Image: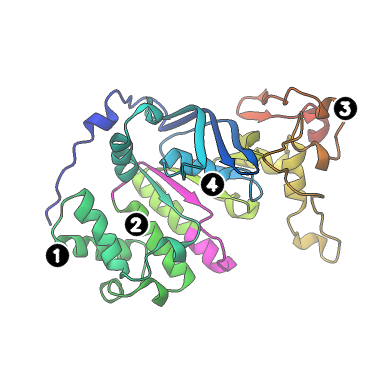
């Protein structure tokens, strides 16, 4: 099989192998609409290292997917605009690179698994054609070599009878199999960082476990960094190293996975955990978070969670926004009353 090498030097000039794989610093994104400016991301900062899994949690509309789209450079603009911050891949700020340089990085170093596999896959082309197109476009392979590599990838993600199924269309696959095809497409060009946006949405629990197990296995084999975006706290419990909890476009808590489940430090995180069904509480009323996330064109002053929070006091309703306070190494909370939340 012939594989054509690609020169990434213009896009990656100045990269530092010792730097974190990805660093996001004070990222800000807004959507300019007819009804006002929606401040979707309001100063998000985090980093991911090779071989590490970072989970980003929160309700729908908190800014998780917009953060991923900003990293990938696929925001619809207009109406979406990155208004501040840095996105550094191995020390290089991608926001200061040309569109062509960012495309090279996006295609070959950072990949994304999209939320809805059926919508992300083109229904009029076979999955084999869509996989092969990546190799033909980015690696200059022949049709025969690209198809052979596509079959190898389908086999890698455990699609049964990959040699025959490479000629099938997306609608001929089950939801779980389509998600495996999406994983194959994301891994096709050997990325160093994989962003998985709700990879188990609309799948039953058994298939969810299979998909997460597959992602974990592939990550360990390739030593990839993984950003897992989800609203399901049960999905990340066994796979994440660290968790960032988002609300109204901000990170409100950061902690290692076991610490966040054992002792949450923000009222929103605590409320999310309390709303998870538990087998030891059978027959009892399920806790819910009252109210709805704020309208991003009219985010409340102070802490955006204050209208729904049981710990709210006057200081929570006044500017400025509570900063992320470091409680101990690796654990931070954007709450004035984190001690009360932790029961200290």
- The residue singled out by tag 4 in the image is 65
The local crowd at label 3, few if under 14, some if 14 to 19, many if 20 or more residues have their Cα within 10 Å, is few
**Earlier-in-chain disc, 2 versus 1:** 1
SS under mark 1: helix
Question: Which quadrant of the structure image shows residue 318?
Answer: top right
The circle on residue 185 is: 2
**Earlier-in-chain disc, 3 versus 4:** 4
CA distance for labels 2 and 1: 17 Å
Residue 143 visible in the shown view:
yes
Residue 248 position, x and y percent, is 67, 39
Residue 215 position, x and y percent, is 44, 54
16 left or right of 315 in image = left
The residue range painted magenta reads: 189-211
- The residue singled out by tag 3 in the image is 314
Mark 1 or 3: in front is 3
Q: Is residue 192 magenta?
A: yes
CA distance for labels 3 and 2: 50 Å
Contact flag, marks 3 and 4 (Cβ < 8 Å): no
204 left or right of 99 in image = right
Image quarter in which the C terminus is found:
top right
Residue 240 visible in the shown view:
no
CA distance for labels 2 and 4: 19 Å
The circle on residue 50 is: none
Image quarter in which the N terminus is found:
bottom left
């Amino acid at each position: 099989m012939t594989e054509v090498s690609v020169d990434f030097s213009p896009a990656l000039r100045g990269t530092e192998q010792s730097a974190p794989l990805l660093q996001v610093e004070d990222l800000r994104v807004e959507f300019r609409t007819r009804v006002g400016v929606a401040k979707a991301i309001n100063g998000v900062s985090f980093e991911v290292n090779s071989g590490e899994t970072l989970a980003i949690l929160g309700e729908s509309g908190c800014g998780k997917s917009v953060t991923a789209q900003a990293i990938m450079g696929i925001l619809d603009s207009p109406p979406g605009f990155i208004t501040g911050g840095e996105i550094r891949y191995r020390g290089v700020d991608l926001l200061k690179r040309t569109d062509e340089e960012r495309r090279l990085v996006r295609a070959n170093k950072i990949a994304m698994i999209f939320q809805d596999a059926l919508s992300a896959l083109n229904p009029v082309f076979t999955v084999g054609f869509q996989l092969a197109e990546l190799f033909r476009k980015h690696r200059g392979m022949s049709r025969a070599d690209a198809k052979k590599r596509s079959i190898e990838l389908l086999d890698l993600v455990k699609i049964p009878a990959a040699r025959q199924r490479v000629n099938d269309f997306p609608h001929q696959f089950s939801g779980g199999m389509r998600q495996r095809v999406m994983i194959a497409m994301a891994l096709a060009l050997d990325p160093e960082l994989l962003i998985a946006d709700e990879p188990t949405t609309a799948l039953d629990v058994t298939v969810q476990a299979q998909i997460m197990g597959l992602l974990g296995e592939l990550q360990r084999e390739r030593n990839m960094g993984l950003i897992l975006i989800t609203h399901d706290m049960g999905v990340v419990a066994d796979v994440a190293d660290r968790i960032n909890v988002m609300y109204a476009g901000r990170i409100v808590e950061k902690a290692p996975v076991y610490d966040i489940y054992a002792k949450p430090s923000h009222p929103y995180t605590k409320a999310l955990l309390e709303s998870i069904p538990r087998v030891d509480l059978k027959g009892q009323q399920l806790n819910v978070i009252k109210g709805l996330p704020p309208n991003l064109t009219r985010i409340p002053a102070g802490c955006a969670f204050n209208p729904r929070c049981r710990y709210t006091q006057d200081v929570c309703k006044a500017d400025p926004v509570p900063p992320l306070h470091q409680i101990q190494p690796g654990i931070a909370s954007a709450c004035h009353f984190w001690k009360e939340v932790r029961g200290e």
